[in-house]
Amino acid sequence: MKKYQLTIDNLKPVTFCATNSQIKSRLHSAYIEFKNKHSLSHVLLYVYHPVQGWRQVVDVRGCYRIINNPLKLNYQDLFFAVIHTLAESDLLPTAQQRQKIIEKNRQAERNLNAEIKRHYFHLIKK
């Protein structure tokens, strides 16, 4: 069972859980709930990744899934987009790995700056 969220423009999201067989009915009811709360006719779909957190559902072409009417959705394409988003999220570095990369880049920049300063500045002894 996956966790999903419907939201747009930093509004309070509507969260729901669904399996592949339940997603059609759950998405429709969550869409109606979101539309009643915020009076908007389009939403963005997010899926929860255990490591990366909430990720916006993107298909293979890199297009975001904007939902205007859940009854007209091609749910097979939606399943593939969710699977693609989760698989893509598995390849991304975790927060700790990102922090290590940032620290490594900072250290390399400090070392490069120190090396440049050593070559340009010479101490003159009297």
Image: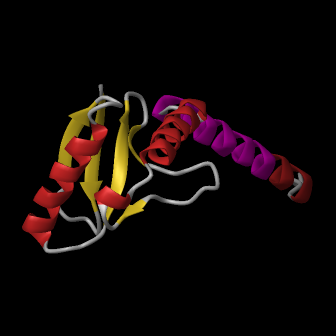
Task: Residue 43: give x, y in percent of width and height.
Answer: 30, 64
View extreme (left): residue: 37
| Magenta part of the chain | 95-114
Residue sitting at x 62%, y 37%: 101
User: In the figure, is residue 115 to the left or right of 77?
Assistant: right
The reply to whether the magenta stretch includes residue 15 is no
The reply to whether the magenta stretch includes residue 97 is yes
Which image quadrant: the N terminus? top left
Residue 87: quarter of image: top right
Q: Nearer the viewer, residue 69 or 83?
A: 69
Which image quadrant: the C terminus? bottom right
User: In the figure, is residue 119 to the left or right of 74?
Assistant: right
Residue 4: quarter of image: top left
Task: Residue 36: give x, y in percent of width and height.
Answer: 8, 66
31 in relation to 23, above or below: below
Task: Residue 63: give x, y in percent of width and height.
Answer: 56, 60
Q: Nearer the viewer, residue 42 or 107?
A: 42
Q: Nearer the viewer, residue 72 or 7?
A: 72
The image shows a total of numbered marks equal to: 0
Task: Residue 75: give x, y in percent of width and height.
Answer: 42, 46
Residue sitting at x 45%, y 58%: 65
Q: How is the image coloured?
A: secondary structure
119 in relation to 96, above or below: below
